[in-house]
Image (cartoon, grey):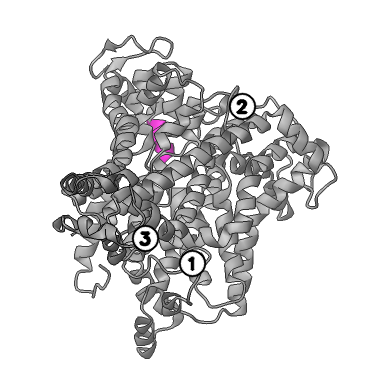
């Protein structure tokens, strides 16, 4: 709107305002008007430019270049030498057992870390939404794991899940269970790793849900209460639909996070088995496979291929999710939908 | 690299953004009262106490393990009360596990990233919220679209680029790719759209102030609460960022999360020393949480409101 008042600056400086760009004050009015127009037109672009420049240089360009690299044989030691191999890397990956193993592990780890995490976050948010004493303490406490780095969290949980002296086996022992080998048993290892993920992110998601819950209009609860809905029914029929878009949003976020799982299995693995995701690759994710191909086997072309496949997998998950959601909403079409 | 450095958020919802930010709560916010506000019963307290305990116990136990010695940590039943060696172990971790250097590096990296992110996000957020220019909406959609790009897609070429630039194993390699954050831009846009009255910007124009001057003397003071929240959240993310620093740096010049992997790699057998390292790497953020926890919680909740 300021662009439409080019005369304004000429009238302004007479007032108390100290000369903004000192020297300009004495310049002839026409030049100042020109400068002003240039400023109004150009400044917005200058203000948003840093974001786009950095993104283009360090994210977009590499993104495009990744697909080019994935069509080549490139070794870590001689990264300037690129040998064209067309789709060989993709074919090799397709035929590689470790790849399918990593896809499977990424999916199972993703499911067992995401589903309980979001359900627990929903419950926790519900509790935090009560009016109570010490609510700030409970919120900060719930968020504290989020401030712990993957490294520290994985180290602590590695110790808690330790086979011989770990606290979790000690507690299981109190109930008469034998010690579980949480590293070498495939499912035990995956449960342990997903525990780290769940521990770190539940509180964060709970706060997202809590914020959404507080925006649900009170009248809906009152209406439901008049209809005789119990608190549990209110939770199901008012709260959950009311925060539906936040739930979808957290599902998207956690799914992206789950496909990228890297630090937890790497550090949980301990020592030489870290990158391979356990001695038998029992918890190697695609992220770890990417790293192994590139920085342990020195095949950058193959690493780039894994990166692209990870992205495609993510896209595939969202397509499936969309289809399922559409099918589900078609079935329950007659129900009232208030959420946007 | 730019995609995940903040809690992303759903679409805006006018009215939520500028309330309850930062320290200064001018009036009790209406919206907090608008939700469901039953009083918590005893069961809710018990469950919340269990949740808080679960959240805090691993950190407490890190401290316990870091304060004893190797033989005590590996006994059954495990120790539950702190021992006498905490400071000794922390000092050893600082030297032997290279945590000292790692912490200084992390401080530099997270500090630079958080400062740059806040500055650029505020600039861009102001432009998107209050300035008129062609392609504004298209560019804003582009910013939001960049959130979808997973960082794995760029690590291989990024690694090549950094060695071409001579930044292999150097801190700029982890600083530069993360200097901006799409979520940060969006966060500041939402905040300024609400908190900054159009009239103030116009008044600045009428007084003949140029855009940078308006930014400096009108926008910045108003944006300050949101900027400090964004700074803290970005700092936490940058401090804990793992995947790319792990690739770009090595043990001679690590950040904290990278140095922590060495603790797990089996060179160090002393379990209480490992825990001391883990504790040391988390302490700065824990201290920040103790002091500013409420603001960080508020910032995350503020950005989260449904669309």
Residue B258 in which image quadrant: top right
Magenta range = A100-106
**Mark 2 against mark 3, which lies toward the viewer?**
3
In the rendered image, residues at marks 1 and 2 fall on the same chain = yes
Q: Please state the horizontal and vertical placement of residue B58, each as a whole percent of the image.
A: 66, 50
Where does label 1 land, which residue? A125
Q: Please state the horizontal and vertical placement of residue B76, each as a whole percent of the image.
A: 79, 45
**Mark 1 against mark 2, which lies toward the viewer?**
1
The answer to whether one can see residue B22 in this image is yes
Residues at marks 1 and 2 touching, judged by CB atoms closer than 8 Å = no
Q: Chain of mark 1?
A: A
Where does label 2 land, which residue? A271
- Circle 1 packing at 10 Å, graded few (<14), some (14-19), many (20+), is many
- The residue shown at (47%, 34%) is B243
Magenta span: helix, strand or loop, mainly?
Answer: helix
Residue B220 in which image quadrant: bottom left
User: What whole-number distance in Å separates the C-alpha atoms at marks 2 and 3?
Assistant: 46 Å
- Of the two numbered discs 1 and 2 on the same chain, state the one appearing first in sequence: 1
- The residue shown at (28%, 36%) is A312
- Residue A295 or B174: which is nearer the viewer? B174
- Residue A12 or B89: which is nearer the viewer? A12
Q: Please state the horizontal and vertical placement of residue B121, each as a whole percent of the image.
A: 37, 48
- Mark 2 lies on a secondary structure that is helix
Residue A16 position (above or below residue A270): below
- The residue shown at (48%, 44%) is B114
Residue B127 position (above or below residue B101): below
Where does label 3 land, which residue? B191
- Mark 1 lies on a secondary structure that is helix
């Amino acid at each position: 709107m300021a662009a439409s008042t080019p005369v304004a600056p000429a009238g302004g400086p007479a007032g108390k305002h100290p000369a903004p760009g000192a020297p300009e004050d004495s310049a002839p009015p026409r030049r100042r008007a020109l400068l002003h127009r240039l400023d109004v037109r150009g400044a917005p672009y200058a203000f948003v430019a840093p974001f786009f420049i950095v993104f283009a240089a360090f994210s977009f360009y590499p993104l495009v270049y990744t697909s080019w690299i994935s069509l080549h044989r490139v070794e870590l030691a001689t990264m300037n030498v690129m040998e064209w191999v067309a789709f060989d890397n993709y074919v090799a990956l397709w035929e590689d057992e470790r790849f399918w193993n990593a896809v499977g592990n990424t999916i199972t780890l993703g499911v067992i870390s995401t589903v309980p995490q979001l359900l627990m976050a929903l419950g926790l948010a519900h509790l935090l939404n009560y009016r109570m004493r010490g609510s700030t303490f409970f919120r900060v406490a719930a968020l504290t794991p989020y401030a712990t780095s993957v490294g520290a969290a994985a180290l602590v949980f590695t110790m808690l899940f330790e086979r011989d002296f770990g606290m979790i086996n000690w507690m299981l022992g109190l109930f008469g269970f034998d010690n579980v080998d949480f590293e070498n048993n495939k499912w035990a290892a995956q449960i342990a790793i997903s525990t780290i993920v769940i521990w770190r992110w539940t509180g964060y998601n709970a706060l997202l849900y809590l914020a959404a819950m507080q925006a649900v209009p009170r009248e809906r609860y009152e209406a439901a209460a008049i209809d005789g809905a119990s608190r549990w029914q209110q939770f199901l029929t008012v709260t959950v639909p009311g925060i539906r878009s936040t739930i979808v949003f957290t599902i998207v976020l956690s799914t992206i996070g789950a496909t990228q799982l890297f630090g937890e299995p790497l550090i949980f693995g301990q020592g030489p088995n870290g990158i391979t995701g356990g001695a038998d690759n029992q918890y190697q994710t695609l992220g770890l496979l990417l790293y192994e191909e590139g920085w342990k086997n020195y095949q950058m072309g193959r690493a780039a291929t894994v990166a692209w496949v990870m992205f495609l997998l993510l896209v595939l998950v969202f397509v499936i999710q969309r289809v399922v959601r559409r099918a589900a909403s078609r079935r329950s079409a007659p129900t009232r939908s208030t959420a946007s | 690299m730019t995609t995940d450095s903040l809690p992303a958020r759903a679409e805006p919802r006018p009215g939520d953004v500028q309330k309850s930010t930062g320290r200064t709560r001018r009036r009790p916010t209406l919206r907090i009262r608008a939700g469901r506000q039953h009083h918590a019963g005893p069961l809710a307290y018990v469950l919340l106490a269990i949740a808080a305990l679960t959240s805090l116990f691993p950190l407490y136990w890190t401290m316990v393990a870091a304060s004893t010695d190797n033989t005590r940590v590996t006994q059954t039943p495990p120790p539950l009360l702190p021992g006498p060696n905490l400071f000794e172990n922390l000092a050893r971790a600082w030297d032997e596990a290279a945590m000292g250097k790692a912490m200084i590096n992390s401080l530099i990296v997270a500090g630079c990233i958080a400062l740059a992110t806040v500055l650029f996000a505020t600039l861009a957020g102001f432009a998107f919220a209050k300035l008129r220019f062609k392609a504004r909406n298209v560019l804003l959609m582009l910013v939001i679209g960049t959130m979808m790009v997973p960082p794995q897609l760029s690590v291989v070429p990024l690694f090549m680029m950094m060695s071409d630039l001579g930044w292999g194993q150097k801190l700029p390699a982890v600083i530069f790719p993360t200097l901006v954050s799409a979520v940060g831009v969006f966060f500041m846009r939402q905040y300024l759209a609400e908190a900054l009255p159009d009239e103030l910007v116009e008044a600045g124009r009428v007084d003949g102030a140029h855009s940078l001057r308006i930014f400096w003397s009108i926008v910045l003071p108003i944006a300050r609460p949101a900027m400090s929240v964004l700074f803290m959240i970005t700092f936490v993310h940058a401090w804990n960022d793992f995947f790319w620093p792990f690739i770009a740096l090595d043990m001679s010049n690590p950040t904290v999360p990278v140095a922590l992997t060495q603790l797990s790699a089996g060179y160090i057998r002393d379990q209480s020393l490992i825990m001391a390292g883990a504790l040391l790497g988390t302490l700065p953020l824990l201290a920040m949480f103790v002091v500013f926890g409420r603001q960080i919680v508020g910032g995350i909740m503020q950005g989260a409101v449904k669309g």
